[in-house]
DNA sequence: TATGATATTATTGTAATCAATTTTTACAAC
DNA sequence: GTTGTAAAAATTGATTACAATAATATCATA
């Protein structure tokens, strides 16, 4: 199911932040876009709902998940837990193949001209997924993939427009510390990196515009998610 | 979907180890057992497959997940990562309500007469889930629930018959250390506890009976999962 | 103009039916 | 007694049509 082209397409659109949280994913519309049947789409949406990528409202349809502020914080807290563990494990079991993959990825990141914003976004997410993969634990790997997706949605929900996702040298620094076997340094760098990403989001309890009832209720945990991108 | 009575029933049967790994979960059979329609069962099985509780083989049906030795180890490694993190968080944010819930649960565990093996099994799993809940992170809470389920399946797959799941005083000891605010002690106790559970399983590469071709291929990672409990 | 009720449209959910695949059973051959 | 083949039965998967619900549009009314 995870290798289904429709699932891949939707996940790709999410990680590239082309789909906005709250967007309705209509069955007929998706069936037409991907040239498939409504049943197929229905199965895909059920799968995405099981993975908290999509929220299903009875008789209303599926909407791209919209995290609350608290859930966004929880996602980052979970990432700190998991990714420090995977970084630590990667350093412990570093071999030539792992070193090569790390260097290769950093090479691609630095060579990225950042003109193609979509490709750049996918590339930065791949760094974290690769580290989880190198840790060699399939369970943590699955969790990491899910967390990266939910992070993309959280960023799309709470980012302040115009700011980049993270500083361009964060990944090379972490990779170098891993390659050097500096566990304490790598862990600290990873935590700083995640903190930085989280702090660029607008997760503060800034008093919303008194006229913006959507933002007001959203702060209480009530998401609209009616139709369209809201 | 998680609160669906059929899902609840299947998950309960798994955590009580009444369902053996590899068991076929036929659509018609389940529909009859739960007095519902095949469509409903089909949705439930798809959901369980998304959560790695069940494995779906095309045109063959759904079978209760059977982890390999490596995956079982990965599950326990993931639990060490997550549960040490949640224990640490629980100690940091311990309040009266949390203390009361901890004490209440330990009270129920010690009062348990262990005559009802099924209830006892559910109770021990609840301890770990409760700790994840007290940590107050919904993401980690969801992961913890999934890991507990997969642990139940792993135990059912690899336990040596007759041995208890864990020593009866492990949970009270951990709870006392948490209540005392002894973070280092609680973390160490939790790790010991998880190690103990894992080591009671037969995850070693003991040379299988040369005639038991099922065990032989299972060691290589090829699970039979044909039909029935194998 | 804004609000409320009603009818229409569109979308999701469910049931029934049919096709495809697999598993079982039966039987023949070595 | 085991192996191989073929037919039969059972189970899963897909298509279709229909029912239920929600969203939209229309119209009346204050």
Image (tube, coloured by chain):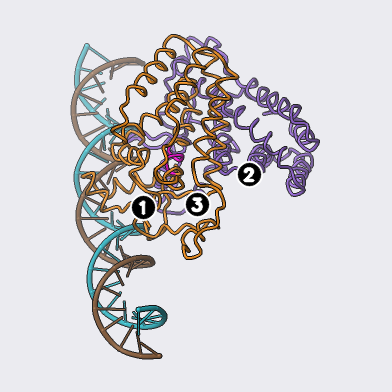
Chain colours: A purple, B orange, C brown, D cyan
* Mark 3 belongs to chain: A
Question: Do callouts 2 and 1 mark residues in contact (Cβ within 8 Å)?
Answer: no
In the image, which residues are magenta?
B149-153
Q: Which residue is mark 3?
A: A4
Image location (x, y in percent) of residue B115: 29, 32
Q: Residues within 10 Å of mark 2 (few under 14, many from 20)?
A: some
* Mark 2 belongs to chain: A
**Looking at the image, is mark 1 or mark 3 nearer the viewer?**
1
**Looking at the image, is mark 2 or mark 3 nearer the viewer?**
2
Image location (x, y in percent) of residue B25: 33, 51
Number of numbered discs on residues: 3
Q: Residue at x 49, y 40 (%)?
A: B200
Q: CA distance from mark 1 to mark 3?
A: 26 Å
* Mark 1 belongs to chain: B
Q: Which residue is mark 2?
A: A136
Q: CA distance from mark 2 to mark 1?
A: 28 Å
Q: Is residue B151 magenta?
A: yes
* Main secondary-structure element of the magenta-colored stretch: helix
The disc at residue B23 is: 1
Q: Is residue B143 magenta?
A: no
């Amino acid at each position: 199911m995870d290798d289904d082209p429709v699932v891949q397409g939707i996940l790709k659109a999410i990680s590239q932040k082309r789909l906005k949280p709250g967007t309705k994913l209509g069955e007929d519309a998706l069936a037409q876009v991907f040239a498939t049947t409504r049943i197929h789409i229905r199965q895909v949406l059920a799968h995405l709902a099981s993975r908290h990528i999509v929220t299903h409202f009875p008789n209303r349809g599926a909407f791209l998940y919209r995290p609350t502020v608290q859930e966004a914080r929880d996602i980052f807290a979970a990432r700190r837990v998991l990714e420090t563990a995977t970084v630590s494990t990667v350093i412990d079991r570093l071999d030539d193949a792992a070193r090569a993959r790390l260097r290769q990825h950093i090479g691609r990141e630095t060579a990225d001209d950042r003109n193609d914003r979509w490709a750049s976004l996918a590339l930065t997410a791949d760094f974290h997924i690769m580290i989880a993969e190198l840790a060699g634990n399939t369970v943590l790997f699955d969790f990491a993939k899910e967390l990266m997706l939910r992070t993309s949605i959280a960023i799309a929900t709470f980012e302040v427009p115009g700011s980049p996702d993270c500083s361009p040298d964060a990944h090379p620094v972490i990779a170098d510390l891993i390659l050097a076997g500096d566990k304490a340094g790598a862990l600290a760098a990873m935590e700083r990196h995640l903190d930085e990403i989280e702090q660029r989001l607008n997760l503060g309890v800034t008093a919303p515009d008194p006229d913006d009832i959507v933002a007001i209720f959203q702060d209480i945990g009530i998401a609209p998610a009616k139709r369209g991108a809201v």
